[in-house]
Image: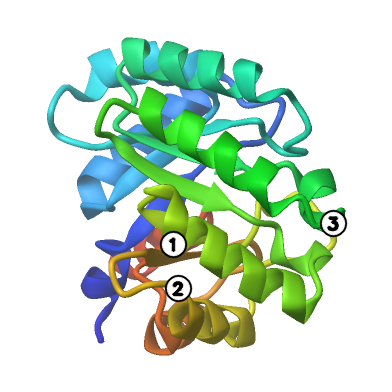
Amino acid sequence: MDRTDILSKVDHTILTPAATWEQVKAVCDEGMEFSTASVCIPPRYVKQAAAYVGNRLKICTVVGFPNGYSTPEVKVFETEDAIRNGADEIDMVINLGLAKAGDWEGVLAEIKAVKASCKGRILKVIVEACLLTQEEKVAMCRIVSMSGADFIKTSTGFSTGGATVEDVRLFREKVSPDIRVKAAGGIRTFEQAQAMVEAGADRIGASALVALAKQAKG
């Protein structure tokens, strides 16, 4: 698998709290130059970015990010606002407290509510795998499979750990065949990205890979 193939699976990401429009604009330029799957950016910049890229690049943003503990109603509002502003894809963080308490019905209801508010756009469900036990990871695979979401995503990149090959492989094995897997958090080399793809990842969330491609091109 060459770098172009990997970049076509990358959500080129900038989610740092202090991100400026100039930085987001640069990420959009890079996403278009290297034909990434999307750019994943803070909600504040979705409208501006969507107008800037037109139909040349998918815009992804985050909901309930990074902690996931806002109410379902707030996550639905965030999603509706993002869609109105031009988002093509939504990455939502689950309510981890509900998951740790074993309230799987509550987790499922929240994901379903957000998916309904996506109006047909892609929904990726961030489960923050580093905070889950093996049993909870398997349960989340079942819940995401039942929810109508499009992806299960390993991590926010803002917690105690990121994507692992083992988690990607587990998710690919345990989710239904129509659910895709996104690996995110700590993927800083093309070798790491390829290992994730080989384990079953359909998308890669990363901020470093395009920079590496630019260095190679330069």
Q: In which quarter of the image is the N terminus?
A: bottom left
User: Mark 1 and mark 3: span between their CA atoms?
Assistant: 19 Å
Q: What element carries label 1?
A: helix
Frontmost residue, 157 versus 140? 140
Quarter of the image holding residue 97?
Answer: top right
Find out whether the residues at labels 2 and 1 contact each other: C-beta distance under 8 Å.
Answer: yes
Give the image location of residue 163, x and y in percent: 63, 71
The disc placed on residue 115 is none
Give the image location of residue 34, x and y in percent: 24, 54
The residue where tag 2 is placed is: 175
Quarter of the image holding residue 212?
Answer: bottom left
For marks 2 and 1 on the same chain, the one whose residue lies earlier in the sequence: 1
User: Mark 2 and mark 1: span between their CA atoms?
Assistant: 6 Å
The residue where tag 1 is placed is: 145
The residue where tag 3 is placed is: 100
Q: Extreme left residue here?
A: 55
Give the image location of residue 25, x and y in percent: 40, 26
Disc 1 residue type (three-letter): Ser
Relative vertical location of residue 66 with respect to residue 215 in this rendering, above or below: above
User: Mark 3 and mark 2: span between their CA atoms?
Assistant: 19 Å
* Category of crowding for the residue at label 3, using alpha-carbon neighbours closer than 10 angstroms: few (below 14), some (14–19), many (at least 20): few
